[in-house]
Image: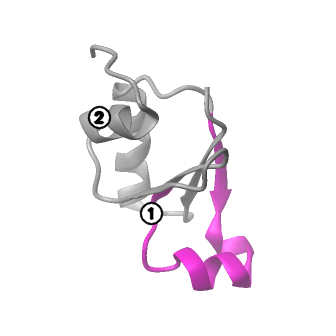
Amino acid sequence: MPRLILYQRDYCHLCDMALAVLAEARTPEFDSVWVDDSEELERRYGTRVPVLRNLDDGRELDWPFDAAAVRAFLGSKRPL
C-alpha cells in the first residue's frame, strides 16, 4: 500500500469533506499534515488544500475528488 499524506488546514470545511470522501473510499491509513504549520507548505499547498499525496511516487490528487477518484488514484477498484 502507498504511504499517503493528506495536506489540509485547520477549520477547513473542504478538508472535512475530503476526510469523509477518504472514509467512503476506504482509503488505507494516511497521515494528516497541516499547511498552516509551515511557510514552505503554505506556499506549495496554500490555495490547493485539501491535497492527497502518494509519498511513494510523488503523485498528488487535488480537491475536488470523490471516492471513485480516490480509488483510481490508489490504483484500486475496490467496491464501496
Q: Give the mark, 1 or 2, whose residue is nearer the N terminus.
A: 1
Q: Residue furthest front?
A: 57
Q: Give the residue drawn at x 52%, y 79%.
A: 46
In the image, the segment drawn in magenta is 30-51
Q: Give the residue drawn at x 55%, y 26%.
A: 28
Q: Is residue 40 magenta?
A: yes
Indicate the colouring scheme. Answer: one colour
Task: Report the front residue among 1 and 66.
Answer: 1
Where residue 47 appears, x then y in whole percent? 44, 79
Task: Report the front residue among 62 and 58.
Answer: 58
Question: What SS does tag 1 mark?
Answer: loop
Above or below residue 23? Residue 3 is below
Q: Give, as a three-letter code, the residue at label 2.
A: Ala
Where residue 70 appears, x then y in whole percent? 36, 38
Q: Give the residue drawn at x 49%, y 63%.
A: 11
Q: Tell me: 77 left or right of 56.
A: left
Q: Nearer the viewer, mark 1 or mark 2?
A: 2
Task: Report the front residue among 59 and 40.
Answer: 59
Q: Which residue is mark 1?
A: 12
Q: Give, as a three-letter code, the residue at label 1.
A: Cys
Q: Which residue is mark 2?
A: 67
Q: Tell me: 72 left or right of 58.
A: left
Question: What SS does tag 2 mark?
Answer: helix
| Category of crowding for the residue at label 2, using alpha-carbon neighbours closer than 10 angstroms: few (below 14), some (14–19), many (at least 20) | some
Q: Is residue 15 magenta?
A: no
Q: Where, quadrant-wise, is the C terminus in this rendering? A: top left
Where residue 22 appears, x then y in whole percent? 42, 35
Residue 34 figure quarter: bottom right
Above or below residue 48? Residue 40 is below
Residue 64 figure quarter: bottom left
